[in-house]
């Protein structure tokens, strides 16, 4: 590995490594107003949720690396301690990117990005009507992390009301991640579309897996199966029965007539293919055949 000491590097280079390594990051599409009531809209990927009681979101408009200036969003939340944090889905990503342009103070990014200003119920800043989830927030505190370019400013926001589009809810009024279709930021010009990359892992508290340590030695020490593969195999409550294995072998023998004479390597490659589709049961039956 190559090791780095941030103190020996330029801020721009440290910034680049951090954004590329800590990714993908959710996007806070922050709507604020200045003392004259002029709206401002800008995205921030230094953002996350940190508490449910009270409901707290934190985002960080960092000082610009190149010239140590601050963003209008920071000036606005210092003057009017309210903000609306809108989430960004795939349908919004191009407009969100456009709104990040450094327009002059007083320019309305809602208009520049072609987005609709929606009056909030409690706070003064407008919501982004096109965003599927909008959080109206009061700013509890602003923590300055430094005075030089690249220094963050933690804007600690308490959610006082939030709005969720019915289009992204399921029958039980829970947010459906597929319908929400969020995007996130990575390094450079890269974004990540969550909908295209989602997968599920059964929680250990719901199913007590046998664990990787209980796997047969030839599986655990496989030169083919990855750590992720082994994790999937270890997260089953019990191994298939001899009857289940025999039925499986009979079922696939037409496609794989040599299944009983396959080497471990051949079986592991085929099992890995089953795992890539989330078919852990078939992978186990094959491995134990």
Image: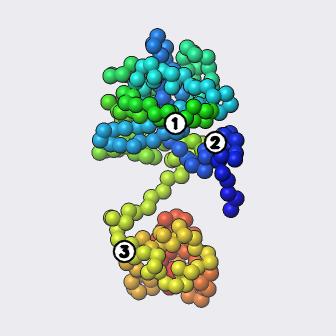
User: Residue 21 placed where, x, y %?
Assistant: 60, 50
Q: Is residue 225 visible?
A: yes
**Closer-to-camera residue (64/237):** 64
**Closer-to-camera residue (196/4):** 4
Sequence-first tag of 3 and 2: 2
Q: Which residue is mark 2?
A: 15
User: Residue 13 placed where, x, y %?
Assistant: 69, 43
State the CA–CA distance, disc 2 to disc 1: 15 Å
Q: Which residue is mark 3?
A: 237
Q: Secondary structure at mark 1?
A: loop
Mark toward the viewer: 2 or 1: 1
Q: Secondary structure at mark 3?
A: loop
Q: In the figure, 21 relative to 127: above or below? A: below
Q: Residues within 10 Å of mark 3 (few under 14, many from 20)?
A: few
* Point 58% across, 20% down: residue: 112
Q: Quadrant of the N terminus?
A: bottom right
Q: Secondary structure at mark 2?
A: helix
State the CA–CA distance, disc 1 to disc 3: 47 Å
Q: Which residue is mark 1?
A: 145
State the CA–CA distance, disc 3 to disc 2: 44 Å
User: Residue 90 placed where, x, y %?
Assistant: 53, 38
User: Residue 96 placed where, x, y %?
Assistant: 56, 30
| Quarter of the figure with residue 124 | top left
């Amino acid at each position: 590995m190559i090791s780095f000491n941030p103190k020996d590097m330029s801020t721009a280079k440290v910034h680049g490594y951090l954004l590329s390594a800590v990714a993908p990051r959710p996007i806070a599409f922050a709507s604020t107003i200045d003392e004259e009531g002029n709206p401002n809209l800008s995205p921030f990927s230094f953002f996350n949720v940190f508490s449910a009681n009270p409901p707290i979101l934190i985002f960080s408009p960092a000082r610009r690396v190149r010239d140590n200036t601050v963003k209008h969003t920071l000036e606005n939340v210092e003057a009017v301690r309210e903000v609306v944090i809108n989430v960004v889905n795939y349908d919004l990503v191009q407009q969100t990117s456009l709104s990040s342009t450094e327009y002059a103070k007083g320019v309305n990014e809602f208009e520049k990005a072609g987005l609709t200003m929606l009056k909030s119920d409690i706070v003064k800043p407008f919501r982004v009507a096109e965003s599927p989830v909008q959080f109206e927030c009061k700013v509890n505190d602003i923590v300055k992390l430094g005075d030089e370019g690249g220094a963050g400013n933690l804007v600690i926001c308490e959610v006082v009301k939030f709005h969720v589009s019915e289009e992204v809810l399921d029958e039980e009024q829970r947010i459906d991640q597929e319908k929400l279709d969020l995007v996130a930021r990575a390094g450079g010009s890269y974004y990540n579309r969550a909908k295209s990359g989602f997968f599920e892992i059964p929680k250990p508290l719901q199913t007590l897996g046998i664990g990787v340590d209980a796997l047969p030695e030839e599986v655990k020490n496989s030169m083919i199966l990855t750590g992720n593969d082994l994790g999937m195999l270890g997260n089953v409550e019990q191994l298939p029965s001899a009857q289940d294995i025999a039925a499986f072998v009979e079922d696939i023998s037409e496609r794989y007539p040599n299944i009983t004479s396959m080497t471990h390597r051949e079986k592991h490659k085929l099992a890995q293919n089953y795992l890539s589709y989330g078919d852990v049961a078939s992978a186990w039956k094959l491995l134990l055949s």
